[in-house]
Image: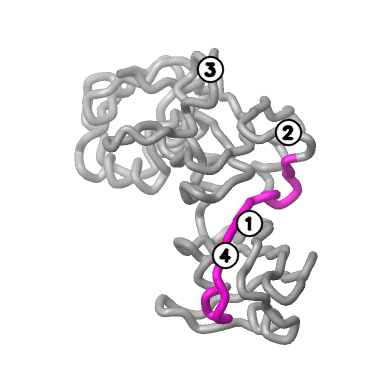
Amino acid sequence: MSYIVKIIGMERLQKIIAQSGLCSRRKAEELILDNKVMVNGKIINILGSQASFDDEIIVDGKKLNLEKKVYYILNKPSNYITTTSDTHNRKTVMELVSGIKERIYPVGRLDIDTTGLLILTNDGELDNHLIHPRYEIVKEYIALCKPSIKKEDLKKLEEGIILEDGFVKANEVKILRTDSSNTLISLKISVGKKHIVKRMVEYLDSKVIQLQRVAIDFLTLGDLEVGKYRKLTDEEVEKLKKL
């Protein structure tokens, strides 16, 4: 298998590897330090080493070749797992896209029963940027919770709560609809912990019945139908890179 990247001028080796989509920049640094990267037949194990488009770069036995970076947004349906393949023969989000010659993959994860906005790309650097906790990129979710939750209890999520893996807080929580049996909320959060929305709601003695991600910062689903995807515009890509 070849992993492909376009290099203009000289770039740091770990950045080139990450941009290829092979792995994150941090993982690329580990590969370099583990003597698993070769440039023009020579093992490179010093971070910060540079390479160019004319160089032959081999990472763990795989050659990097030229490929265009592509970016898509998918409105993920329920019952699809967010991965490129599955050993249990479950449906993956990759079955929803076709006719794309580049080797794309999902950025981050949505649970199998969670729907909504998912980015697909072959840009490893953007992937790392969007999911790394230090960038605190805000994601918005719509959650149907049962039983209903009082407004004063929801405020606790903005003030911050302690879960088993530490302190977390929501950037913003709004009630969209509520009755005696359930509450529909909008929750904005920049924390990237596993099942974080579901666990925050469970802290309030309620349970998420339906969950949809509707935005990543400025990027929203718009009128994109469930199960459909589209290419991101150049403007959207540039804005994502600047988050």
Q: State the residue position of label 4.
A: 208
| Mark 1 Cα shell of 10 Å, populated few (<14), some (14-19), many (≥20) | some
Residue behind mark 2: 224
Q: Is residue 11 visible?
A: no
Q: Residue at x 76, y 33 (%)?
A: 235
> If you read the primary sequence from the N terminus, does the residue marked by circle 1 or circle 2 appear first?
1
Determine whether the residue tagged by mark 2 lies in a helix, strand or loop: loop
Q: Quadrant of residue 90?
A: top left
Pointer 1 with pointer 2, Cβ within 8 A: no
Q: Position of residue 210 (x, y in %)?
A: 60, 56
Region in magenta: 202-221
Q: Amino acid at mark 4?
A: Val
Query: Is residue 18 shown above or below 130?
Result: above
Q: Which residue type does callout 1 highlight?
A: Ile
Name the disc covering residue 137, or none: 1
Secondary-structure class at tag 1: loop
* Percent x, y of residue 142: 68, 58
Q: Is residue 210 magenta?
A: yes
* Disc 2 residue type (three-letter): Leu
Q: Is residue 116 magenta?
A: no
The residue under the point 26% across, 34% down is 44
Residue 52 drawn above or below residue 48: above
Protein image colouring: one colour
Number of other residues with Cα within 10 Å of mark 4, as a class: few under 14, some 14 to 19, many 20 or more: many
What is the C-alpha distance between the residues marked 4 and 2? Answer: 24 Å
- At a point 27% along the width and 35% down the height, the residue shown is 87
What secondary structure predominates along the stretch shown in magenta?
Answer: strand
Sequence order check, earlier mark of 1 and 3: 3
Quickly name the residue at label 3: 98
Cα separation, mark 2 vs mark 3, equals 17 Å
Identify the image quadrant of residue 2. top left
